[in-house]
Amino acid sequence: MTPNGSNDTVTLEIIRASEVTPREVKWLWYPYIPFGKITLLQGDPGDGKSKFMLALSALLTDGKPLPFQEVEEASEPMTVIYQTTEDDADDTVVPRFIASGGNRDNLIFIKENEKHLTFGDDRLRQAIERYNVRLLILDPLSSYIGEDCSMNDANKTRTELNHLIKIGQETGCAIVVVAHMNKNRDTSPLYRTNGSIDIAAAARSILAVARTQNKENLSERYMVQVKSNLAPTGNAIVFEVTDKGVNFQDEIELTADEAFSLFAPKLGRPSEKVDGAVAFLKELLSDGRPQLAAECEVKLEAAGFKKSTIKKAKKKAGVHSVKEGFLWYWALTVGEKPKEERQAVMADDGLPF
């Protein structure tokens, strides 16, 4: 008998850190949704969580970049599984998906006629592997965690979530679980996840949808990042909920606590930061010669500009991205020149092309 009273014996095995090959986290949408992990998207009923995820699915299935994602090269269309018990596929989900411009061949549903899915159902893994699924959406959490699992029971919820964690780890599929928030409006958004705190603890990223304070447009929402274990916390995404889906509007510097506060700032704030970054970029690239994109970003961040500000300033300043070999360069004018002339300019600087 073992010291804990169990008759079971398990052979001790160890893995040395020297035997583990480090690898980088891969992202479906940096820094919001990692591949191979659980992301939680939460919000109050009727605030547009499901429409938000369908809009993202439409972009992914059509091979288009996600909102405010700086993508230099086109991506391949992805297959997405969308499981929901709150809306019917024929009269709600698919019409909204079509309105968002999605590729219907790349959005699939697992039939639940005979048996409802749960986190531990092997059909999830089978579908992901068989159809090379890159994003799995389960909406809502309370329907898929299992009928016998109390959401307030930490031991049971963690056990159920471990099934989903393992599927993500072994398939590399991004998993987004949609959840309703509790009514504790006076607490931090991190503690507004319905049920045990272990649910929030299991997710590597937590996103939340909140209404804005824009009284002129009651359909306007913030998507904010409440928790980020694998990357710096992302900026807020401003979007509008419409009858047909979602219109993505802007990316702003706003925290989750600010978004859920009664004193959340209104949109339309001055753009001094963007203008300052534009001036910095123009001075940095004033000689017309291309500079490494990574080095430009480092200099801008060192000067106090955040990534969202840099992206806006890059566009406003007319900065071009030029790829030579395996490296990306930024320039104000060189991107419009013929390839031979770009290479000549870069050769003068001893740069690869």
Image: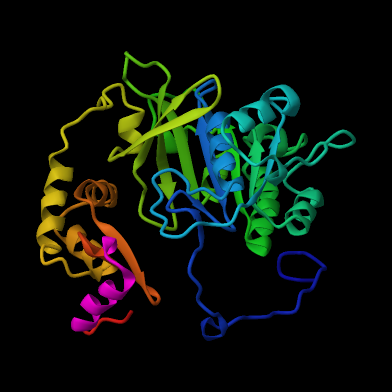
Q: Nearer the viewer, residue 337 or 210?
A: 337
Residue located at (61% from left, 52% from top): 77
Can you give x and y, in whole percent of width and height, for residue 236 in the image?
Answer: 35, 39
196 over 69 or under it: above or below: above
Indicate left or right for 186 with 128 as reference.
Answer: left
Q: Nearer the viewer, residue 82 or 140?
A: 82
Can you give x and y, in whole percent of width and height, for residue 38 in the image?
Answer: 58, 50
Which range of residues does the magenta coloring cover? 335-349
Residue located at (70% from left, 79% from top): 12
Instruction: Specify the quadrant of the image occupied by residue 115.
Output: top right
Asked if residue 15 can be seen in this view, the reply is yes
Q: Nearer the viewer, residue 344 or 110?
A: 344
Indicate left or right for 84 with 181 as reference.
Answer: right
> Is residue 347 a member of the stretch shown in magenta?
yes
Can you give x and y, in whole percent of width and height, for residue 263 in the image?
Answer: 26, 23
- Residue furthest top as drawn: 216
Indicate left or right for 99 with 346 as reference.
Answer: right
